Image: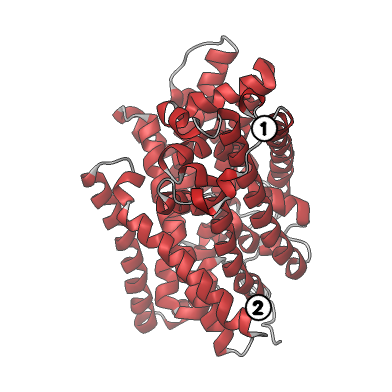
Amino acid sequence: MTTRKTQQSGPHLSGKMGSLELFFSVMAYNAPMVVVIGIIPIMVATGSGLGTPISFVVAGLILGCFAVGFTRMSKIMPKPGGFYSMITAGLGREVGLGSGFVALLGYFCVYAGTLPFGGIVLGELVHTTMNGPDLPWWVWAAVFWAGAGVLGYFNIELSAKFLTAFLFLEIIIIVGYDLFVFINSGANHAGISMAPLLPTHWFDGSFSSGLLLALGMYGGFEVTVLFREEVRNPNRVIPRVTFAVIAVAMTIYAVSSLGFINALGIDKAVELATADPTGSMTGTLVDFGGIVFSDIATIFVNTSTFAVILAGHNITARYLFNLSADKIFPRKLSSVHSRHGSPYMASMATSAAGLVLNVIVAVAGLAAIDVYAAALGISSFVILGVIFVASIAVPLYLRRHGMGHTVWSRIVFPILGILGLGTGLILAALDFTALVGGSPVLSAALMTLIVGLFVLGIMMALFYRKAKPETYSNIGRQ
């Protein structure tokens, strides 16, 4: 196999993250604690019902098929542009730049849009659990904003250490919950039922909605490539971590959803989750772990939320850095800190943009939870869209350069990945209004923004091709 030589002529970051640090940095973006406590009850209530565990398994297998080509491509692309680079290499600079703009929007929504949610959960922890003051959400959101801004300024290894500690403890809590449920034989000690894994229950609810939600819970594995320059021995570490993230996330989500269903009781799970998604999960935490365990879980919902904010901040900053290094954005944003090797100017720009957006939200008096719901819907849709485009670009590039080894890696896995991701994207487009909060006017405006950014990227690339050939040749970190 031939690979491109890494070129260090442009600005580049530095770091020495190992497998564990990168793994936990990626898992932080997926926020397993938030998924288990906040998303799984919703999926049982409004998604695939008792078939929720299988939704996670199917979503994991789809992304695993895509990851076969993705990890192979990661060994070829010398610069850390992530999907932006891969799409450019496979489908051209026009589609690449359009996808880069859309991906930037998606990750910024994860960062800035999760700040209001962070303000809510931290406020509830301080006021309800700790009997502290009852302050507006934006006061507590400012704590998360400041923490992410400070850590994002320094070398990625500092953020990775925090994320590793948080995620390790989160996973302990999740595993503890699952063990409590399984050891105590579920609701009323009636025994653990494996019925949700049987085909007869896969389509009890809306399998399409369940699959869409499940796919959205794996979105962070692009981070493995985006941090390429900051990883020690990336050609070995990135493939290993990518598959590990998918496998571990799939296991945690599937087992925890099976545990949650059994904690409520197979016959009553959907009914109880539908009546009160949040309360049903909190109730099982208390029933099987006790009040103290439930309070500890609440604390780690906060650390998980901060981990998402920090991961979203770091990813957004690196997209800004890459687009700046390609001379699409002002070159100052691709400045590298002489001591920390970090994209510190892009990091500060990300913090400033997040602050401005949340100040507008606070001054306008918008409901924090509605803003979070809309931001989550946007990010889920656009990141799934970018992954789908990448699922086409990667096998095209590998095939064009004769880099496929077997019929499985050249044909079977790419086709399965494209079909699965394409199905998810179509479902997301059809359900976009519900994804962003249910307002047709808002959904139309946001869809216009997404499509507009993609078209803007294409138009800018066409302009650069004629007016600035040097800038055009840089697109996609090529």
Q: Which amino acid does label 2 sit on?
A: Ile
Which of the pair 346/380 is nearer the observer?
380
Q: Does residue 233 appear to the left or right of 88 in the view shown? A: right
Residue visible at 39% across and 68% down?
A: 98
Is residue 157 shown to the viewer in this render? yes
Please tell me which of labels 1 and 2 falls first in the chain.
Answer: 2
How far across and how far down the image is residue 169, in percent?
A: 73, 35
Q: Quadrant of the N terminus?
A: bottom right
Residue visible at 51% across and 47% down?
A: 51
Look at the image and name its color scheme.
secondary structure
How far across and how far down the image is residue 428, in percent?
A: 37, 55
Assess whether mark 2 and mark 1 are in contact (beta carbons under 8 angstroms).
no
Q: What residue type is labelled 1?
A: Gly
Q: Does residue 330 appear to the left or right of 5 in the view shown? A: left
Residue 298 falls in image quadrant: top right
How far across and how far down the image is residue 311, in percent?
A: 59, 46
Dot 2 falls on a residue whose secondary structure is loop
Which of the pair 210/309 is nearer the observer?
210
Mark 1 crowd level (few <14, some 14–19, many ≥20, 10 Å Cα):
some
> Which residue in the structure is indicated by mark 1?
191
Dot 1 falls on a residue whose secondary structure is loop
Q: Does residue 318 appear to the left or right of 175 in the view shown? A: left
Mark 2 crowd level (few <14, some 14–19, many ≥20, 10 Å Cα):
some
Q: In which quarter of the image is the C terminus?
A: bottom right
> Where is 349 relative to 457, above or below?
above
Q: Residue 76 carries which label?
A: 2
Tag in front: 1 or 2: 1
